[in-house]
Structure formats: C-alpha cells, structure tokens
Amino acid sequence: MEFWTEIGLPAFALPGLLNYWVAIILMMIGFYTVMAHENLIKKVIGLNIFQAAVFVLYISMAKVDGGTAPILGDDIEVYSNPLPHVLILTAIVVGIATTALGLALIVRIRDAYGTIEEEEIRAAEQEAGT
Amino acid sequence: MNSHSVVRVVTKLLMPFIFIYALYVQFHGDFGPGGGFQAGVIFASGFVLYTLVFGLENARRVAPAWLTRTALGLGVLIFAGTGIASMIYGGLYLDYSALAHDPHHGQHLGILIVELGVGITVAAAMISLFLVFAGQDKDD
Amino acid sequence: MFMLATALAIVRLRNLFASAMLTGIYSLLAASLFVVMDAVDVAFTEAAVGAGISMVLFLGTLALVKGKDRASRPKDVLPLIVAIATGAVLLYGTLDMPSYGDPNAPIHHHVADLYLDEGGSETGVPNIVTVVLASYRGYDTLGETTVVFTAAIAVMLLLGRARRRPRKNGKKIDAIDPEAPV
C-alpha cells in the first residue's frame, strides 16, 4: 500500500476491499469465457481463470497486516492465517487433476465427433438423432 | 529435440538438482515451506523435462506403466495405512500421537510419513498424466 | 493488476496456443501475488503446478486436437449480462467483508488462533501449514489425495490404449469397449 502513496497516488486509490474486487473481476472474466466461447479448450482455460481467482480471494482473506508466513519463529508475534493456505494448497493440486480429466474428455470428444466446437457437436448429435 | 547436444548436457546437469530439490522440499516441509504436494509436483516436472529432451521411449524405460501405477496406489495406501497403524497402537484413526512413546515424536513421525504418501501419489499421478497425454499417437 | 491484463488477453486471443502459454504466465503472476500475501506454501505449489504441469498438459492437448478458436465473435450479449450481473452482486457482497489485512476479522479468531498457539507445541513442527494439512485436517488431505488418485486413474482409462483404434473416416467411432485393457 505504501507503494501507491510513494508514487504519488492518493492513499484512497487502494481501498481495503480492492483485493476482493480484483478477484471478483477475474472470476467474472473466467465465468464469461466459460459461457460465451464455443471452443471446449477455451472453456477449460476459462475455468482455470475462475479457479485462480478463487484462490486469490481465499489467500487475501488469510492476510494479516504485519504478519509473516505461518512458520513459527522465535521472535515473531503475528502470523497470517494458515487455514486458507491449507485449503488452497490442496485445491490447487486437485484442480490440476480435474483439469487434466477435462482435457482428456476433450480429446475423446474430438475422437468421436472430429471437432471441439460446441455448436458443431450439437449439430452432429441432432444429425445422428434424426 | 534429440540432436541438440547443449540441451542434452544442460538437462543432464540439471536433473540431479531438480530431484534432490524435490526430496529436500519433501522432507524439509516440517520446517520451511514445502511438503508432499509441492515435492510431488517438482519431482514430476523434473521428469517432464527429461521426457521432453530424451523422448518418450527413454522416459517409459525409466518409469514403466506398472511402476507409476503401483506408486499411485502405494501413496494412498501409505496415508491410509498410517491411520490404521495409529489405531493398532491404540489411538484414533490418523491420531499420530499414538505412533511413538512421546506424542511429539509420534506427531512428527506421522506427519512425515503422511507427507511421503501424499508426495508419492502426486508425483506418480502427474507423471502418468503427462505420459498418457504425450503418448497419444497423432492420427490424421 | 497484471493478472487482469493477462486474463483479458487470454479471453480475447483466438490462437489457442498463445492462450495456453498465457495461462502459464497468469499462474506465475498469481504465485507472486501469493508470496506478497505471505502464503509461501501456496505460492510454491501454484508456481510448480500452474506454470509447469498445467501448461504442459494444455500444450499436450493442443498437439492432439489442434485447432483455433473458430467462433469469430460471441454472438449474443446474454453471457456478458449474466457475468456482469453476477459480478455486481458479488461486489455488493464484499462491502460487508472486513478490509484486507484486518487482524480483527472473524476468520482469524475461529480455529486459526488455536492452530497457531498450540500447533507448534503439540507436534514440534514449526511449519503450521504442514501441521494443519497433515495432522489437524488429516481426513481432508486423505480425501484430496484420493481425488488426485481417482482423477489420474480416470484419465488413464480415457486415454489409455483403448483409444488407439482406427477411426471410421473421421466419423463417429463405435462405442468404446469398456473391457479394453488400459
């Protein structure tokens, strides 16, 4: 925060909730990508963006002013909250595993339909149905 | 990328450091940042580097399918087995205090073993994910 | 801030290869942000996973399916409206949240105090994240390890040897033999 005042921006340029707002905007970018894009890989990338935004939100909540990383030391009094760190740590690894699963499904979908565009898949489905 | 000798030599130089670093992260996780999840991923990324430079054939010789698959299950079994072991020693499931005479040592030991299990599973999972994706033959 | 720019670039870019590369940069930026917010363990994982493995997986998939994001422009504005509306509601929700870094926020006084005070003395391990991960929330971690295990198995089943079947002129292939060896 000092950084902003040093370079001449007024202190109110960085209100206390800014981190949450950035996380939410990132989340919405990911959400929009998932909804608007036809390409399945692009959708998975959008999900990834969304996911990372949630991580940022959680870690922002864990931050304590003047605290350090939660590794006990002799003359340190304030630590940031370890609980969200633990949750996000495992979430990242689980996230990559599920992303890999999604990508594997995409590869199989391309095998079956020859395309990874949602509309074309739907068209192929209807063709097969009639 | 097989023919670039610079890449090959540099990779060979880097490999031991990456793996030793992974092991350091694994067993030093109690005192500094690190632990099973990170160590597993670092180990796997070292392996990915090897595969990219030396090719799939060699990589499959180092880590055949049966090995990664066994390791995948082994890690989960170590984790769950630690829980059973602490039950046998008279504690609750995953209550490491029962593992040694001194609860402190028990906790420390339990955390170490459990992290090892996590590390093995994550490393095996990432390596097999990568190999399966890379091992696809590109049709058409 | 850089994350915002990167994310926007990812969405706009039509070249899937470039967007896959940008996801790596995005993850690296997220990791450095985590360091700033004192979450070293998380930053460590995010850097290794996001910038390393996940990008490799995306590129691997692209090598298999190759292709560009052909949809020229998202046609309808409905997704945009939905996204903006959801974002507005969430932003309104943050107004009630304690400000960033506030040591009196309720999240810091539920169980976190206990972990920080007792964790070190109960286990003799100074890294509290490791303590909570492996000891206090051991069940969680066991479950998450199992999820990773299951996902890896599922990917192996999906992309195993069963896939290497000749395709019929690029049309739909037959149902996959569920008994096929992996």
Image (cartoon, helix red, strand yellow):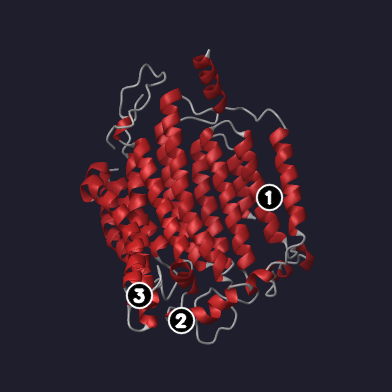
Instruction: Measure how far apart labels 2 and 1 are at the Cα level.
Output: 41 Å
Tell me, yes or no, whether dots 3 and 2 are on the same chain: no
* Residue C124, label in figure: none
Q: Residue furthest bottom?
A: A75
The residue that disc 3 covers is B90
Q: Which label lies toward us, 2 or 1?
A: 2
Residue B119: tell me if it is visible. yes
Residue B55 position within the rendered picture, expressed as x and y whole percent measured from the top left = 27, 43
For this view, does A92 lie left or right of residue B116? right
Tell me which amino acid carries mark 1: Ile
Tell me which amino acid carries mark 2: Glu
Residue C157 occupies which quadrant of the picture? top left
Label 1: state its secondary structure: helix
Locate the C terminus of chain B and report the quarter of the image it occupies.
top left
Tell me which amino acid carries mark 3: Gly
For this view, does C17 lie left or right of residue C89? left
**Which of the pair C25/C74 is nearer the observer?**
C74
Instruction: Measure how far apart labels 3 and 2 are at the Cα level.
Output: 19 Å
**Which of the pair A63/C153 is nearer the observer?**
C153
Q: Residue at x 56, y 63 (%)?
A: C34
The residue that disc 2 covers is C122
Q: What crowding class fits label 3: few (fewer than 14 Cα within 10 Å), some (14-19), or many (20 or more)?
A: few
Question: Is residue A36 depicted above or below A63 in this figure?
Answer: above
* Residue A25, label in figure: 1
